[in-house]
Image (tube, rainbow, N blue to C red):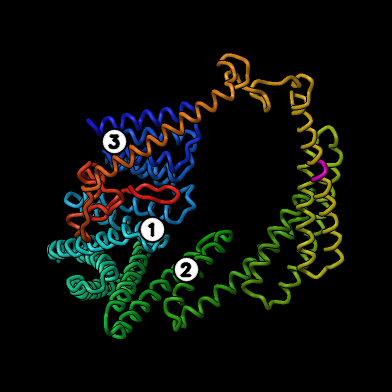
Amino acid sequence: MKTKTIFCALFLSCRMLLLCGYGATVDEIVTLAEAQMSAGDSEGARAVLVAELELKPENPYLLYNMGLTYVAENELELAEEAFRKADLFVTDPELHARIFAQQGNIQAKLGRASFDKDPDMALQQWRSAHQYYQSALRKDKSLEMAKSNGIATRDGMVALIVTGTETRLATAKAFERNTYVKIDMLRRCYQDLDEAVTLSPKHEHAQLLHQQVEGLLAENLNALAEKELSDAQQYLASNAEETNEQKRKQAFSRAVDAATQSIQLFEDAASLSTEPDKFDLKIAEGQMVLSQAFLGMGKDKLEKMETMPEKRQSAMAEMALEDFQQSLAADPNNQEAQGLIAEVEKMLAQKYEAEADALVQDLDRLNKESSKASKRKQADELYDQALALNPDDVDLQAKDKENALALAGLLSETGEQKMEKGEAMLPENPEGAVTNLEAAAADFHQAMSLLEEHGDAAGSEAAAAAAADASAAADGVGDKLEEAAKTGEASDGAPGEKAGEDAQAGSPGETPPGAPGSGSAGGDEPTMGQLQKSSEQAMSLLQEARALAQEAASATDTGATQAGTPSYESISFVAEGGDFNRDAVGSGGEKEGNFNTQPMKKPARDW
């Protein structure tokens, strides 16, 4: 009965503070909520915090304590949301640390709940919890809650990894014939155990399991690599007398895949072995098989190219060149691949040059400068490709320069035409004018680049000046369009127009209806005496609330308990069971397992 009376008085006191318009501080609001939480009335505490959050929605102390009320009711999603929001606005490192710690508590509790049904999910949640505790300690190294809970969660993770590994090892024995599945399971075990021995280097069982799994994984990786290498060699050999084009293509592709896989597996096994040099010969053997497979694929493409139309030969030669380059990358000593690369590069350079020559010769039948410029651009790209493969060809260099200078001239001409067209559109069609002026500037820029590249400094400067003129003209028209748009907006009722000169409801300086001093519905303005009386009542109620809060806290002091660090099997959280009961909550002492929910104020003080 006494507790109920205390908290009724506290609730009424809080309501009176709000109704009287007294500007209570965050510390005072938390004091009221603290007393209610101490007696187990988390809903009442939440009501106090909700009312204050309506006035201060970004106050991290209020948001943090709101999260604690949700934790007390085991509403963990809402608690996590409140802590995340508090984290957005927090500047106090101590509060920031506690926010991280409480988020860690939530994830640790979720992991404990998942432990029996879904150990993998439990491990994932404990990993998240451990990260939160580490973040908390980076903010506040002395935060005992993060220290002890971090240790408990770490130990739980290691124990769970050890148990899970033993289960997977037993299951892996059933997959002796399916090496791929077995290796996947061993990889998972090895990664988890890596984490376990990193977290707890002195855990002997984890260390022994780590060594056992390392040996098993290396053994199975080597066995699978041997199989893949054998398969690759068989695929390669099957092409010796194969005449079907599609079957040869498939066999080469499979040889590439199997050889690539064998190399990777041998390298993985070597990384786990105490004698990695023993795998060097096997890796080299796999690389030779891979190189030969790419070489065969490229040769087939060259043979196919000879039967194709002229227009498609360049594309096929490019693919063959890529195969030969991959062959050489797999085996840098493959001299056949080196020779074929040189041969195909020379062939492609000749084809690019021939295609570019054909485009240039075809210009005479074109009348428009824009069409001629388009053809010249294609020819310029082909000459550049040919020069990339054959950079020392003097005749090719001369052709490229002649075409580039001609292209620059055409671009300058088309630029002038677009500029004249744009200027002619003013003022009837300013948008069209801007489009043409910008296109003219782009043409001049391209001409400038070509002239500069081929040493025509004077022409390059002239093109640059023309590009600047076109850009400036386009910008000028654009500015006028923006100015016209703004003028049009102002004429539709912008501030300053006669139609809008009358004061609007809610405008700055106007007293809203019902506000003190408004003289409208909502009551007359209170006198100074009434305001003073309300303030005195509020102060009196606040003092009474503080006294009641202290009395409530004292009444529950005897229930405070202290315990050592829990094991992962018995982690106890506030959200798991009545830590806010009268028999369990102290006046700021640490709770069992150190998973407390303590309020933050300025200065910080814990429930």
Is residue 107 visible in this depiction of the protein? no
Is residue 503 visible in this depiction of the protein? yes
Numbered badge on residue 208: none
Residue pointed to by mark 3: 41
Magenta residues, start to end: 474-478
Does residue 60 appear left or right of residue 360 in this picture? left
**Is 127 colored magenta in this rendering?**
no
In this rendering, the answer to whether 509 lies above or below 66 is: above
Q: Secondary structure at mark 1?
A: helix
Residue 593, located in which quarter of the rendered image?
A: bottom left
Closer-to-camera residue (464/140): 140
Q: Which amino acid lies under the numbered mark 2 shown in the image of this protein? A: Glu
Numbered badge on residue 136: 1
Q: Position of residue 120 (x, y in %)?
A: 23, 55
Which of the image's four quarters has the N terminus?
Answer: top left
Mark closer to the chain start, 2 or 3: 3
Residue at left 73%, top 77%? 394
Residue pointed to by mark 2: 303
Q: Secondary structure at mark 2?
A: helix
Q: Position of residue 110 (x, y in %)?
A: 26, 48
